[in-house]
Image (tube, helix red, strand yellow):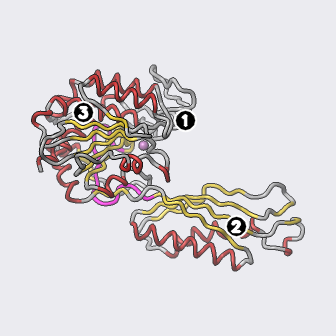
Amino acid sequence: MASVGPWTRQANRWFPRMRAWRRALYQEPELAYREVRTRRLILGALQSIGIRGHRIPGLNGVVATIGAGRPGPVVALRADMDALPIEEATGLAFRSLRRGKMHACGHDVHMACLLGAAAVLKERASSLGGPVRLVFQPAEEQGDRGGAAPMLEGGAFDSPEVDFVVGAHVEPSIPIGQIGWKVGPVMAAADHFVITVIGQGGHAAFPHRGPDAIVVAAEVVSGLQAIVSRARDPLEPVVVSVGSVHGGTSHNVLPDTVVLEGTVRTLQPTTRADMEARIRRRVRHITASLGASAEVEFRRGYPVTSNPPGAMKVVVGALQREFGSSRLLALERPMMGAEDFSRYLERVPGAFLFLGVGTGRTPSLHSARFAPPESILPVGAALLSSAAAGLQAA
Ligand code: NI
């Protein structure tokens, strides 16, 4: 790799330790809100480098502060902790020790990178431009009840109060060693809806005796797509997907109800609110026109993850100095996935970046074969530490 800055050189010396931390975390994958062994591993790793971590009460989240008491901006660096209910198929020698669970989203790598960043920042604690808060967050993979909000409620950004936040996610679609960045929306808002279509069940041979919930539900599924294709600006992305349809028990019995569940992805808060209103209205009109009715439940998930221009400019400048411009990749488009990091960016400015782990053979995130190259660990540590230093020097 071409240009290597001081943070990378320092992080490279920590590579064996980072790899050991990463493998230990990888072997003990735990699902959202159950990250007990993970928490202990992190507290132990922090202790081994002379940093005292604190558990957030009632959660498995861990926070620590390097350079506490120093004057200057407080920068939080965040890693997520949870794994997924996937049976591993990587063939790695250090495979998951927990059947049916796997770090298939790279959160083990995120934690090891943050521990590496902590180690290099600790070595330079006397010259830091302010305190750095380490934030290990549980339960990122939880949709409408992710761990970021309870971490904030539990004081993760308090005393001293955090001014900026930086995080990164491994990304197989970006070549290894490249860092993807984008100002404005980078990840979508994800909301979950549950629509109960209420008709009148009965014998399938006498459909005229009451509204048939199945036929009405089919109209609702089509009608939702027509919102996207006919009621929204085609230049502004919206996804509506119905992911589950449940109704009926027999081929010759019409059910009373059909339950549709799905997700809405948007990139602007106004679009998000508009989609909820349109979905409610469209469902009401379609069902009423067919003599049926419906109940619509709309559960707000993660908001849009949006990088403010000011902080992003500073972070990109710091990364260019550390890695060289050729390693930075300006992303043209956001990803339609969602991130709990959005909650932090709603609170303070900062940057959410993508750490390339693509080799042409790296499977996608959430794949049972996902295995990012470990050479990425010092890059991630240097990314986080140089971004924090850049924000403090600005
Ligand atoms: Ni993830």
Circle 3 residues within 10 Å: few <14, some 14–19, many ≥20 = many
Q: Residue at x 38, y 44 (%)?
A: 173
Circle 2 residues within 10 Å: few <14, some 14–19, many ≥20 = many
Q: Residue at x 39, y 48 (%)?
A: 148
| Left or right of residue 229: residue 105 | left
Q: Amino acid at mark 2?
A: Val
Q: In the image, residue 64 lies at what x, y percent?
A: 28, 36
Q: Main secondary structure of the magenta part?
A: strand
Q: Nearer the viewer, residue 52 or 367?
A: 52
Q: Which mark is residue 197?
A: 2
SS under mark 3: helix
Looking at the image, is mark 3 or mark 2 nearer the viewer? 3
Determine if residue 344 is in view: yes
Q: In the image, residue 269 lies at what x, y percent?
A: 40, 67
Q: Amino acid at mark 3?
A: Ala
Q: Amino acid at mark 1?
A: Ile
Q: Which mark is residue 86?
A: 1
Q: Give the Cα separation between the discs numbered 3 and 2.
A: 52 Å
Q: In the image, residue 91 lies at what x, y percent?
A: 49, 24
Circle 1 residues within 10 Å: few <14, some 14–19, many ≥20 = some
Q: Give the Cα separation between the discs numbered 2 and 1.
A: 33 Å
Q: Looking at the image, is 250 positioned above or below residue 280?
A: above
Q: Which mark is residue 118?
A: 3
Q: Earlier in the sequence, mark 3 or mark 1?
A: 1
Looking at the image, is mark 2 or mark 1 nearer the viewer? 2
Q: Which residues are magenta?
A: 174-189
- Residue at the bottom extreme, as displayed: 289
Determine if residue 358 is in view: no
| Left or right of residue 369: residue 315 | left
- Quarter occupied by the N terminus: top left
- Residue 380 picture quarter: top left
